[in-house]
């Protein structure tokens, strides 16, 4: 759409007091990354076949999938070309890599998301060198997915019922779905797209269960794409979002795979059935750990999209004067509106920085694990659980806040805010449900509180538990250091309260698991523990309002610095030029209900009633 940039946005950009490009480079972790990102953006966004004539909301469930799969294979080809050209596209130093460009192309989810994001990365991390040499071929026929969750079990994966039984006579595993609740249910791309998958199943050798292991299974013929004998596979139906992801179900009827299809980097089953244990029980859960880490950056990016849309719209939208004799004001001038939006910008930066830090920590801990040192794994797991849970919950709440901040127009699909919300809120559940993950972190904290309570030595990271017990916390100070101290006090107080409840339940004769369940609200909820006083809260509130006023002239600059192209934002409300009403009218004209001046239903259903009444 051509035309002038909205006058209010022009003024906002003139008001900005910092160098927008400099912030973009910081977000991208360096100017060279910005340049590389823009090259990839240009390359992909110039592929004409990736653009829709009809907005995807008007397509049927089947058409949506077919449209998405067409694009997915164009993108896959490009990814392979870029890889061949040695362009590193999976570098998570920045969330704004090729994956985020896909948000614009699909306006939904790439059906190959799990193939690219989880299938290959799990093979790379958990298959032996020989297996990797065989499976990780650039021209592989395999289109895979990650198949873990079942109809009956998602959170409690030890309860998974699919079995893999070793048959030493044929040197094979037999994959089997013993009952309805054991059907695999949810994996992305499983419904129609994948011809292979990584399956999480209980390993049985000579009648002994060795717990969960991962197996590579072909499920469809590479040539005809028909399900192999003994495989029942299909799609699970429409969802709140993720509708182009063809999430699927899968059942095995004594399906045989070679022994060498178990992922054997960390654990092995030998030809004679000997089981060689892994160095750490939970290395099999490694893909979940990695995805939780990458999700933090992805959620930061979703927040930056929502903030860009809502801030630009709020600069363009004028409604009601503040003083009665004044013209109507930009809604961005209302302090309550600033409160809704600026917190979203800030949260995006927070999770971007934390996501990057976690990504680097993951790299470091993985390198240690390769050397046989598992020492840092529990802390990384506890942090990943907590941060994935909190970032997804915050992101979905803030995206929804941005949608509401756009009033009625935010309710339009063409604003793209409903789609961003549907995408973001799914992350609260998948890859470890919110409460379940918080309880994993609580388990870690309680362990160290027990040491503190028993006056045993604590690692440096937990020294503040001891400070709390000795009442060494300083009075609240309104400064970054003071805020960190305040958070330490909250964590220590909260952990102590939960621990005390746990102990009390145990003293009353409860078994540990039951006592844990009874304390679980305290284990997950924030508590009132703080060194902060009522006066401090008032001081903080007025400081906060001062800061909102300080940010106000830079609000549009701050979201421009996210540097998200219109083709990725896909929003009538958030485009760079701010021509909101023109875009809304243009989008409305695409509605199939506007194709005929009089819809045929009038003659069929309306006229017979209305005209009959007239007679
Ligand atoms: C290249 C990248 C591209 C980017 C791609 C991004 C893609 C993002 C979009 C993807 C979209 C959708 C993907 C969705 C995929 C899925 O959802 S896959 C399915 C995910 N499922 C889950 O997450 C299940 C959650 N449940 C669990 O993880 C476990 O059941 C749970 C950890 C809750 C419990 O496990 P148990 O075996 O029962 O363990 P416990 O007895 O509770 O004790 C656990 C001890 O083990 C430690 N632990 C647990 N997990 C880990 C781990 N992952 N790593 C290390 N350690 C672990 C735990 O701390 C306990 O230790 P302790 O005994 O206290 O010392
Ligand atoms: C969009 C989407 C994509 C997905 N993609 C995949 C995929 O590619 N591959 C795959 O294998 N799976 C996938 N999943 C499945 C996903 O990983 C699971 O849905 C998720 O792990 C949650 O498990 P659940 O559905 O069993 O929830 P449940 O565990 O049944 O949760 C229901 C409620 O019970 C509570 N609860 C459960 N256990 C406890 C406990 N111990 N203590 C306290 N409360 C508890 C939860 O907090 C929640 O409130 C996907 C899911 C979605 C929504």
Image (spheres, rainbow, N blue to C red):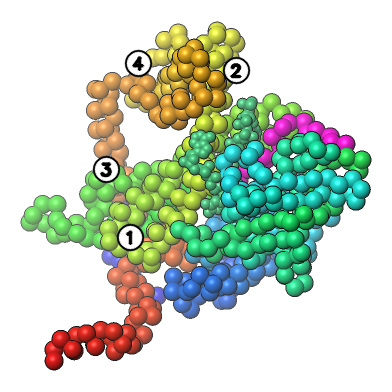
Crowdedness of circle 2 by 10 Å Cα count: few (<14), some, many (20+)? Answer: few
Crowdedness of circle 3 by 10 Å Cα count: few (<14), some, many (20+)? Answer: few
Residue 282 counted in the magenta span: yes
Q: Which residue is mark 2?
A: 459
Q: Nearer the viewer, mark 4 or mark 2?
A: 2
Q: Earlier in the sequence, mark 3 or mark 2?
A: 2
Q: Earlier in the sequence, mark 3 or mark 1?
A: 1
Q: Residue at x 44, y 18 (%)?
A: 501
Crowdedness of circle 1 by 10 Å Cα count: few (<14), some, many (20+)? Answer: many
Q: Which residue is mark 3?
A: 549
Where ligand 2 lies, by quadrant? Answer: top right
Say which element carries label 1: helix
Q: Is residue 324 above or below residue 497?
A: below
Q: Which residues are magenta?
A: 274-294
Give the percent coordinates (x, y) of residue 518.
Answer: 46, 25
Q: Nearer the viewer, residue 135 or 298?
A: 135
Q: Which residue is mark 1?
A: 410
Count of numbered badges drawn on the protein: 4
Give the percent coordinates (x, y) of residue 88.
Answer: 68, 54
Q: Earlier in the sequence, mark 4 or mark 1?
A: 1
On residue 475, the disc is 4
Q: Residue at x 42, y 54 (%)?
A: 421
């Amino acid at each position: 759409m051509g035309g002038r940039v909205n006058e209010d946005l022009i003024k906002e950009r003139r008001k900005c007091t910092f160098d927008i490009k400099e912030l973009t480079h910081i977000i991208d972790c360096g100017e060279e990354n910005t340049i590389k990102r823009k090259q990839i953006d240009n390359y992909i966004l110039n592929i004409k076949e990736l653009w829709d004539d009809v907005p995807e909301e008007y397509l049927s469930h089947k058409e949506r999938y077919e449209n998405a799969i067409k694009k997915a294979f164009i993108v896959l080809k490009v990814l392979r070309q870029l890889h061949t050209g040695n362009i590193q596209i999976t570098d998570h130093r920045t969330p704004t890599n090729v994956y985020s460009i896909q948000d614009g192309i699909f306006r939904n989810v790439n059906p190959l998301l799990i193939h690219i994001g989880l299938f290959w990365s799990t093979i790379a991390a958990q298959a032996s060198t020989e297996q990797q040499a065989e499976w990780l071929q650039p021209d592989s026929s395999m289109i895979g997915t990650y198949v873990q969750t079942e109809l009956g079990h998602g959170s409690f994966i030890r309860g998974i019922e699919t079995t893999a039984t070793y048959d030493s006579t044929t040197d094979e595993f037999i994959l089997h779905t013993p009952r309805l609740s054991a059907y695999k249910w949810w994996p992305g791309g499983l419904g129609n797209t994948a011809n292979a998958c990584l399956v999480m199943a209980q390993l049985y050798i000579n009648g002994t269960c060795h717990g969960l292991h991962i197996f590579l299974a072909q499920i469809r013929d590479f040539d005809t794409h028909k399900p192999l004998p003994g495989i029942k596979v299909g799609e699970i139906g429409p969802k709140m979002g993720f509708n182009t992801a063809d999430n699927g179900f899968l059942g095995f009827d004594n399906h045989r795979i070679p022994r060498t299809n178990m992922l054997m980097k960390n654990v092995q089953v030998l030809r004679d059935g000997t089981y060689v244990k892994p160095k750490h029980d939970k290395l099999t859960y490694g893909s979940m750990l990695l995805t939780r880490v990458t999700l933090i950056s992805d959620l930061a990016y979703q927040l930056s999209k929502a903030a860009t849309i809502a801030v630009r719209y709020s600069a363009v939208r004028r409604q009601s004067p503040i003083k009665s004799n004044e013209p109507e004001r930009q809604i961005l001038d209302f302090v309550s509106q600033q409160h809704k939006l600026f917190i979203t910008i800030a949260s995006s930066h927070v999770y971007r920085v934390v996501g990057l830090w976690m990504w680097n920590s993951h790299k470091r801990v993985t390198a240690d694990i390769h050397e046989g040192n598992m020492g840092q794994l529990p802390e990384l797991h506890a942090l990943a659980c907590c941060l994935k849970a909190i970032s997804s919950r915050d992101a979905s709440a803030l995206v929804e806040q941005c949608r509401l901040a756009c009033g009625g127009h935010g309710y339009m699909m063409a604003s793209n805010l409903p789609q961003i919300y549907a995408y973001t809120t799914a992350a609260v559940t998948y890859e470890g449900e919110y409460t379940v993950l918080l309880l994993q972190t609580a388990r870690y904290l309680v362990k160290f509180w027990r040491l503190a309570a028993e006056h045993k030595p604590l690692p440096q990271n937990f020294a503040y538990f001891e400070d709390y017990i000795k009442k060494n916390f300083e009075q609240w100070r309104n400064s970054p250091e003071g805020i960190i101290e305040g958070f330490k006090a909250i964590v220590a107080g909260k952990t102590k309260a939960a621990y005390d409840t746990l102990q009390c339940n145990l003293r009353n004769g409860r078994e540990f698991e039951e006592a844990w369940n009874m304390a679980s609200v305290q284990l997950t909820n924030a508590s009132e523990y703080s060194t902060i006083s009522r006066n401090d809260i008032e001081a903080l509130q007025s400081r906060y309002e001062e800061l909102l006023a300080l940010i106000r002239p830079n609000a549009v600059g701050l979201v421009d610095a996210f540097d998200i192209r219109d083709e990725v934002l896909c929003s009538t409300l958030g485009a760079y030029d701010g021509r909101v009403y023109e875009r809304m009218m243009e989008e409305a004209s695409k509605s199939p209900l506007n194709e005929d001046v009089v819809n045929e239903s009038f003659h069929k259903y309306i006229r017979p009633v209305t005209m009959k009444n007239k007679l």
